[in-house]
Image (cartoon, grey):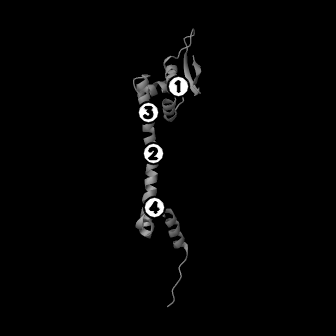
Amino acid sequence: MTRILRGYIARRRRTKMRRFVATYRGAHSRLTRTMNQQKTRALGSAHRDRGRQKRDFRRLWITRLNAVIREKKVFSNYSRFIHKLYKRQLLLNRKILAQIAIFNKNCLSMISNGILNIQLEGKGLNEVPRRIHSGEVEYKLIG
């Protein structure tokens, strides 16, 4: 009885999988079933860790900000500083604030002074800082 030649679709699927796991060690890059298991596991871990990476970076930025804020004695802690930022509607995220805190601590002091001392002379109207460009605070009047 002659041998029946199968199609190329399964081989193409395995070749594609083999390219994905080519750098794995041992049977993880040679045997089809373990290749498939490792590929599934790797993709699941990548999906899980994308969310974890966002959390970790946010924690890092918050820790850096808190350290600089306490060192400079700008506010007593991070949460009060962020509360004042939201109250004054200052549009800066934690990543930018952490970069400012590390590379230019004087600019962070300027931001905190802008938060603390916001009142117009003579009119008694409150100002709200809107944006910061190169250390200058742009204000919007509320009246």
Q: How far apart are marks 1 and 3 (CA)?
A: 15 Å
Q: Which residue is drawn at 51% across and 33% down?
A: 99
- Tag 1 and tag 2, C-beta contact below 8 Å: no
Q: How far apart are marks 1 and 2 (CA)?
A: 28 Å
Secondary structure under the numbered disc 1 in the rendered image: helix
Q: In this view, does 140 lie to the left or right of 105?
A: right
Q: Name the residue under label 2.
A: 53
Dot 4 crowding, Cα within 10 Å, few <14, some 14–19, many 20+: some
In the rendered structure, which amino acid carries the disc numbered 3? Arg
Q: Residue at x 44, y 60 (%)?
A: 40
Q: In which quarter of the image is residue 12?
A: bottom right
Q: Name the residue under label 4.
A: 39
Q: Name the residue under label 1.
A: 107
Q: Percent position (x, y) of residue 113? A: 50, 19
- Tag 4 and tag 3, C-beta contact below 8 Å: no
46 is higher (above) or lower (below) than 30: above
Dot 2 crowding, Cα within 10 Å, few <14, some 14–19, many 20+: few
**Residue with the most extreme bottom position:** 1
Q: Percent position (x, y) of residue 48? A: 43, 50
Q: Which of marks 1 and 4 is in front?
A: 1
Q: Which of marks 2 and 4 is nearer the N terminus?
A: 4
Q: Name the residue under label 3.
A: 64
Q: Nearer the viewer, mark 1 or mark 2?
A: 1
In the rendered structure, which amino acid carries the disc numbered 1? Cys
Q: Which residue is drawn at 43% across and 54% down?
A: 45
Q: Earlier in the sequence, mark 3 or mark 2?
A: 2
